[in-house]
Amino acid sequence: MPVTLSLFTLYRDPAAAVRWLVEAFGFEVVARFGAEDGSVAHAELRLGDAVVMVQAADGHAPAPLVGTSTSRAPVLTLDDDAAVDELFARVERAGATVLIPPETTEWGNHRFEVLDPEGHQWSVGTHRPGAAW
């Protein structure tokens, strides 16, 4: 049975979130619905096989930060340590708040963790969830 998992994320300013996700991570906008004033009612962004859907928060807030985690974060998996480090440099230049700078964990995941401008946590690393160890 084929299954596709997409992330649905709510933002107070979805148009700004779309711009930031494109700049910081290199997402490509594949669908955008809104008004002529540039507002975004719904947008879909793709990076490789990852898809993020962005909509207006309508009063919802991101999960609170406790230590270095909001308790939920999309996980982007890259092929190697160099790709992780390159993406970290890009998201840091775009103004992400760094929670965990690039590191290699004891289980071999080269990763970093950041918050986007609205406080949503993003995890990037080389570990591919669901793959055999």
Image: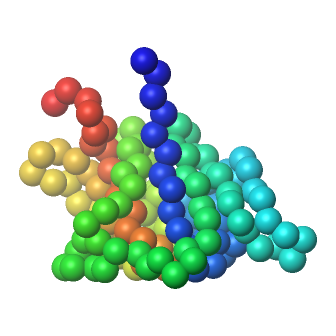
Task: Determine the residue located farthest toward the front in the rendered image.
Answer: 58
- Give the residue displayed 26% in from the left and 30% down from the top: 131
Residue 133, percent across and down?
A: 16, 30
| Left or right of residue 6, residue 129 in this image | left
Taking depth in this image into account, of 116 and 93 the one nearest to the observer is 116
Instruction: Pick the residue in front: 103 or 128.
Output: 128
On screen, 80 above or below 35?
above
Q: Residue furthest right?
A: 36
* Residue 44 locus on image (x, y percent): 65, 52
Asked which colour scheme the image uses, the reply is: rainbow
Q: Quadrant of residue 72?
A: bottom left
Tell me the residue at 60%/61% (across/down). Answer: 54
Q: Nearer the viewer, residue 9 or 115?
A: 9
Q: Quadrant of the N terminus?
A: top left
Is residue 31 visible in the rendered image? The answer is yes
Looking at the image, the residue that sits furthest to the left is 106
What residue is shown at x 20% (from left), y 27% (from top)? 132
Q: Is residue 100 visible?
A: no
In the displayed structure image, the side of residue 42 where residue 76 appears, left or right = left
Q: Where's residue 91, x and y in %?
A: 49, 68
- Residue shown at the point (39%, 38%) measured from the top left: 79
On screen, residue 50 versus residue 55, left or right, reads left
Count of numbered tags: 0
129 above or below 86?
above
Q: Is residue 77 above or below residue 133?
A: below
**Res 113 → quadrant:** bottom left
Comparing 67 with 8, the one in front is: 8
